[in-house]
Image (spheres, rainbow, N blue to C red):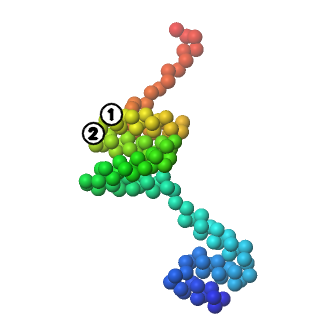
Amino acid sequence: KGAAAAAAGSSSASSSEAAAVAAADAGSSSAAVEQVSSSERQLEVDPIGVQLLLGKAYAGWRGHDQDALAAYDTLIGAFPTDFRGYLAKAVFLKERGRQGDAERMFLQAKFYAPEELQAFVASRAGERATIEPLPDNGME
């Protein structure tokens, strides 16, 4: 128990390490392994989300439009089949008045977006939702 207290009191030891040491001291090594594994899962970072956030930060920073475009281009280059990079770049370009470039990016985003997000992409592009006509069932 002294090792657990020392690990918990040390500024360099994380709380998950301290919990793992305490669990190991208590004789439950499987609990210690489980604790370390759960802390490793918490450290996973979504690289797409990070790049989107970077682009958004640059987009909001006056004078850094080229940095924002570079962030979105990096994302598109690294994950060419993920619609989010195309969509983010399209929204950015649309906000900057570059409608033609934005439309091309919206088309790419729509192509790669999953079916359940097609309407969302279309709404960001400014398209009106289309309603499929109902069959007339032979009545005229």
- For mark 2, what is the residue? 97
Q: Which mark is residue 64?
A: none
Element under disc 2: loop
92 with respect to 28 (left or right): left
Q: Residue at point 51% right, 56% down?
A: 46
When the figure is inspected, residue 96 is found, relative to residue 35, above or below; the finding is above
Q: Can you see residue 123? A: no
When the figure is inspected, residue 108 is found, relative to residue 45, above or below; the finding is above
Could you tell me which quadrant the N terminus lies in? bottom right
- For mark 1, what is the residue? 100
Q: Can you see residue 88? A: yes
How far apart marks 1 and 2 lie (CA) works out to 9 Å
Q: Amino acid at mark 2?
A: Gly
1 with respect to 94 (left or right): right
Residue 86 image offset from top left, x and y in percent: 43, 42
Element under disc 1: helix
